[in-house]
Image (spheres, rainbow, N blue to C red):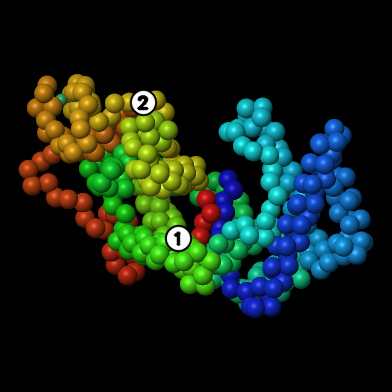
Amino acid sequence: MQLRYSFRVYPSAGQCRSLAKAFGCARVVFNDALRVREDARAAGLAFVTAGELSKRLTAAKKTPERAWLAEVSSVILQQSLRDLDTAYRNFFDSLKGKRPKMGPPRFKSKRDTRQAVRFTANAGWKITAGGKLCLPKVGDLVVKWSRTLPSTPTTVTVIKDSAGRYFASFVIETGPEEVLPPVTPEVGIDLGLGHFAVLSDGRKMDSPRFLRRAEKHLKKAQRTLSRKDKGSNNRDKARVKVARAHARVADTRREFHHQLSTKLIRENQAVAVEDLAVKGLARTRLAKSVHDAGWSQFVTMLEYKASRYGRTVVRIGRFEPTSQVCSACGVQDGPKPLHVRTWTCKECETVLDRDINAAVNIARAAGLAVPACGARVRPGLVPAQREETGTHPKPHSTTVRQTGIALL
Ligand SMILES: [Zn+2]
């Protein structure tokens, strides 16, 4: 399967200028090509082919208005045309109902928050013996290699994000040699309201303290921004601070999701989760927006790691009354208000933890074999340990640390 590995890069001032030129050229080529196609459409002419666009690009480089396009690697300009083709294909497929609805390709702006260029093998980019990233017409960039690449990539995308940071993103092909030996445990996961995730074996996973701290910092930065006068220099400064705090929260959350998903996939042969679309029905708009973005990123990670390491992830697609059914005897006990955290089954008199009971039911609905005892509330039940929540319990933890900014 294909995976994306991203690393922070630190270009020098001169390299930043070269990259800015590359982003600009790629954007102009994209916009020029889009205009050609849109003009043809408006005039009732046939769809302009990719080959024709490529010919026009070569011709444009010979004109004085576009001569500066020759100052950057020609590969990134060709890749820009490919991106436009992909955008059109996705749009046409969405019209045919093959994929979710989306709009036609749009013109790119200098002010877009994310700028990117792609170098393929043809561009002649390489990783130098000294571990630098050598890009044509840019130079040797310093890279922070936060993990090792499992194989040699053919393509690198250089990205500048809204916080002004640069990343190199590689596509890596992974092989069947990564499949892990089978294990017996299977687990169901409930998206908790109070906790990030609750497992059918009784463990409750909180978001780690470092993530909560980053979120608090972001809220503060946002409050400061809202107090600044529009159009003032201080407002600009505050806006950059908010963008940085946003980026930090996103990175920290992604790292937590990486750690927890790797742990769950290693420990369990099969993992069951509730589909978000279904889960969303039961919640308010507010809780949804905050929680769901994170949850879907987490589930995506579980799924690709499962296929990478030979495990199974099952999504429960239909609506299951997971919090109403007693996992011990199967009796449906009716809906319960949200503040009810534990309840006693009327039929078998088992005292059940709401969230764990739901996680057990999710696992069962997925056809997994999990014991019901996890949901039973025992007197003096010990709450989940901090170590189990995916934080850094010790400075040198043995968990696989997926640092780097995986864009998955
Ligand atoms: Zn019961």
- Residue type at mark 2? Phe
Q: Check residue 319 in the rendering and tell me which mark sits there, or answer none.
A: 2
In depth, the one of 237 and 184 nearer the eye is 237
Left or right: residue 312 versus residue 164 is: left
Q: Image height check: is 323 above or below 28? A: above
Up-down relation of residue 277 to residue 205 (above or below): above
Q: CA distance from mark 1 to mark 2?
A: 34 Å
In primary-sequence order, the first of circles 1 and 2 is 1
Q: Quadrant of residue 109?
A: bottom right
- Helix, strand or loop for disc 1: helix
Q: Label for residue 331? A: none
Q: For residue 246, which numbered disc appears in the image?
A: 1
- Residue type marked 1: His
- Residue 126: x, y in percent? 70, 67
Residue that appears at 29% across and 26% down:
321
Quarter of the N terminus within the rendering = top right
Could you tell me which residue is drawn at 69 percent across and 68 percent down? 19
Report the residue at 69% width, 43% height from top.
Answer: 105
